[in-house]
Amino acid sequence: MAMTSLRLIGTGHLASALRAQRTLWRGPRVSPPKAYDGGQKLHIARLSSLAAATVVPATLAARRRSRRQVLAVRAVATESPPEAIRFRESVGPSIVLSGSSAEEWAGDALVLFVRGEGDDATPVLEAAAKSIDDILGGTISVFMKEESFEAKSGSAAAFPVFDKAFKRVVLVGLGDKDPNAREVGAAIAGAVKGLKGGSVGLTRAEGVDPQALMEGLLLGLHADKRFQGSKTPEKDKAPKGPNTVELLGYESAEDIDKASAIAAGVVFARELVNAPANIIDPITLTAAAADMAKQLGLSAKILDEKDCGEMGMGSFLAVSRASNLGARLIHLTYSPGGEVKRKVGIVGKGLTFDSGGYNLKAGAGSMIEMMKFDMGGSASTLGAAAAIAQLKPKDVEVHFVIATCENMVSGNPGALHPGDIITAMDGTTIEVNNTDAEGRLTLADALLYCQQQGVTEVVDIATLTGACMVALGKDITGWDLHHFSGSDDTR
């Protein structure tokens, strides 16, 4: 007998917010879920391949009680985040110092650098590349001439080598002036991403920052394949890049540690943003933040709706009340362990899905299907927290604050309507003329809360408005830096 999935749908009811999916046998009888208490009517509609159940709350009081049950059960169910959004301290291949020279190294791909002189970036081999060219009988020089290789910053080309200790040579251009080390690292990643494991030998080039180079390499090798199903053709056979990168002629492991910490934070932020709204919501985002904080030794304080209400966060909660998943305020703190000379805040917008509310995102260009990325500010904040926790800067205490919720449409008590007047935690009243301007409402209370922690500088990270892209384009970030004086004024 065939099986299908049963999803319970109902405004504010426990079964709805849990998004409970039970197995339904196609047949004449359907048993109600265990959470059903008999106080509401359960209507079952059978279709040929889909069964849907609608729960109708009997009273407003029952509806409110169900919503509280939803949040309690949902929170318990997600104390640990889904594996897909957990922080990973190690990303990409392992990077190790090697005592070998380029001439002695054995492995799968040897990376050599080439300077570019003049406007046409005429290639000039670096010392290690010149030595390998001599070993290969001038093969590199011939290859560059035949392929018209221009050694511009970030250019790359590769060719196989036979009967040598290394199997492939990768040439990477540095340009004529100071090269962009991250761009160069990304070019290396592009050239070796096709490897199915193995090792890469990375020679050193004068004037190229090793840390930035390795950051570009690690981030360039990152590929997000978490949501490719088991039916994806050849998924397990796809190239995964090298297993190991060996640094030839490098002296300090400190650059490796710093690059790895920053790359881990950036990858964490990327994967949070890329996760869809049915994977990452206010509760699972909170769980992912708390899990990362526990791994890296940050202190974590989580405020639920009751806590936020007691602090007067009416602006934040007005946005959250249309969603059955509720709201959380996440507060992580990095402490240097010694004297604190500065207190800095990083506040991130945490809308895990933004429908626009009653001012619904509709029509071409609304990008409603992309609104999983409206928590990009919170992802960046958590990525920064992960990196800072590993880098351990001295003298500075950093507070990471995220007000996370969804912006939905519903008849829940207190849900936001156009024209509503709400009150932020400092007593400021706000008239809401457009429910799709929700980001500034959540951030208002988050910024005020952050100010209460005694910070003097706050960086606010948010996908706040499409007007920023209109003004600056897609490659430039608009920065909003707040300085708090000793008074209540913001400069």
Image (cartoon, helix red, strand yellow):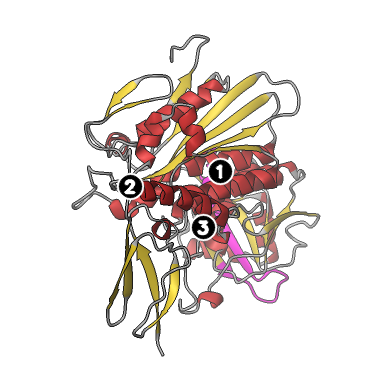
Which quarter of the rendering shows the C terminus? Answer: top left
Which quarter of the rendering shows the N terminus? Answer: bottom left
Q: Nearer the viewer, mark 2 or mark 1?
A: 2
Disc assigned to residue 156: 3
Q: Amino acid at mark 3?
A: Ala
**Which region of the structure is painted magenta?**
159-188
Helix, strand or loop at disc 2? Answer: helix
The reply to whether the C-beta atoms of the residues labelled 2 and 1 are less than 8 Å apart is no
Disc assigned to residue 340: none
Disc assigned to residue 60: 2
Please tell me which of labels 2 and 3 falls first in the chain.
Answer: 2
In this rendering, does residue 205 appear at all?
no
Q: Which residue bears the numbered disc 1?
A: 383
Residue 166, compared with residue 447, is above or below; it is below
Helix, strand or loop at disc 1? Answer: helix
Between residue 435 and residue 16, name the one nearer to us: 16
Q: CA distance from mark 2 to mark 1?
A: 41 Å
Please tell me which of labels 2 and 1 falls first in the chain.
Answer: 2
